[in-house]
Image: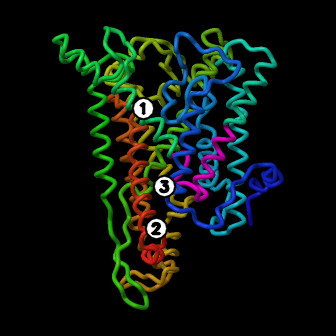
Amino acid sequence: MASKFLTLFKPFQRFTFEVRKPERKPSFKKKLAWTFGILAIYLAMLNIPIVGVEQDPSGSDPFFAMRAIMASQRGSLAELGIGPIVTAGLIMQLLVGSQIIKVDFTNPSERALYTGAQKIMAILLTFFEALAYILGGAYGELGFSEQILILGQLLIAGIIIMLMDEVIQKGYGLGSGISLFIAASVSFQIFDGMFSFSPESGGLYRGCILAFFQGIARGDVGAAFSRPGRVPDLLGLLATIVVFAVVIYVDSIKIEIPVQHSQFKMPARYPIKFLYTSNIPVILVSALFANIYFISNLMWRNWGSTATGFKNFLVNFFGRWEASDATGGQEAPVSGLSAMTTAPYGPEQVIAYPWNAFVYLLLMVILCGVFSRIWIDTAGMSSKNVAKQLLDANMQIPGFRRSPRTVEKYLDKYIPTAAWLGGFFIGVLAAVADFLGALGTGTGILLTTGILRQYYEIFASEQISETVPALAGFLGM
């Protein structure tokens, strides 16, 4: 029976938009067209300014640290990016993982109720985050009519982004919209960090490769190797390349469990990857940290150093902000919870705030491991689910009875351990890449690498299903 919490959302589901699954499986070319079409729309939203908002001539952005992960752009229709969608998923995962709500994901009606509740929560979060931006002064002083106009634009844009993600996930496109938007955002930041012509202090271009050649022309080869603030440099580019290589290598590490068909005795192997939950833990942890960052900034902008009493306690708890050379003149948290959950970007910031770096690394590793472990239960990847899948496919583990409990107990030796260790490793890699100043942030590179690899596998499987339908059917594609 569905949780009472989920049933609260049931009356409202009829008012939400829903994308129906295609009656016939679209061809690979149509899926590709849908995917690139939706990506083009999203990129356009990133560049269409919100009507009624004056652009900040200084170019300052209080939420610059979370833009790449949330795939957002200041002052555009995609101001909130995928933040509300990911946050809604994070909340639902925590509720299910902590057993506050119980959902039987093998029951289609309960699974649909869970999905509908998550969608409604994403819309509510879009509304409240947009309202927080407006009332928090992110767009300056506004009249009531202007506030309503901006709120309406952000709410409609948020719903459109949610529907675009659903269109891709329902089978019209390839992969998922969230992954696609993150990869596009981070890829743009990496490209911009390498080849941007924007001038920076010292007369060098922002793009680290262009700055390197400028340094050679000036006779100062090391000018672009390490630069202060959040300016891209060659050390960050090197860290980016190393993270890409490490993730690709580690993603291929796996344990293969011997299985065989119960009737024909055909031997096979079931792979359990070291990165069993892929990049999901980093997405969830990033969403949690981004919301802490968001709340802290709103409190500081509204109350700041003038807060007293309980307000002062909240400001100190979530963090105080200040601008410095280490942050490139941008205001950033220097104390409190927000400072501990914001990665010090580059060696200069790590040296300036070593305690913050240590706590951030610790939190990143622990939370990635915890979310990875929770995810396997809520996403149907647990030992119990895998055991059922194998038995339903008439497979068995040689030397063991075809009992769900027996197979589950055998898989328990590998799957939970892979979830924990994979989560820990991906947390360490994301944090260290940030400490080295990787382009697009360490978390962003980590996500993009995994996403691009997933798309490579999706393209390969789609081409097999198009060229050899019989083989695709046998492999369950």
Residue 477 on image: x %, y %: 48, 69
Residue ID for mark 1:
359
Question: Does residue 456 lie above or below 36 as drawn?
Answer: below
Q: Could you say whether the residue bearing mark 3 is in a helix, strand or loop?
A: helix
Residue ID for mark 2:
466
Q: Is residue 346 visible?
A: yes
Residue 474 on image: x %, y %: 45, 78
* Label 3 Cα neighbours within 10 Å, binned few <14 / some 14-19 / many ≥20: many
* Label 1 Cα neighbours within 10 Å, binned few <14 / some 14-19 / many ≥20: some
Q: Quadrant of residue 191?
A: top left
Which three-letter amino acid code belongs to the residue tagged 1?
Val
Which three-letter amino acid code belongs to the residue tagged 2?
Glu
Real-space CA distance between mark 2 and mark 3, rounded to the nearest whole angstrom? 36 Å
Contact flag, marks 1 and 2 (Cβ < 8 Å): no
Q: Could you say whether the residue bearing mark 2 is in a helix, strand or loop?
A: helix
**Side of 177 relative to 240 (left or right):** right
Residue ID for mark 3:
373
First reached walking from the N terminus: tag 2 or tag 3 = 3
Contact flag, marks 2 and 3 (Cβ < 8 Å): no
Residue found at x 30% / y 31%: 237
View extreme (left): residue: 219
Contact flag, marks 3 and 1 (Cβ < 8 Å): no
- The part of the chain drawn in magenta is 158-179
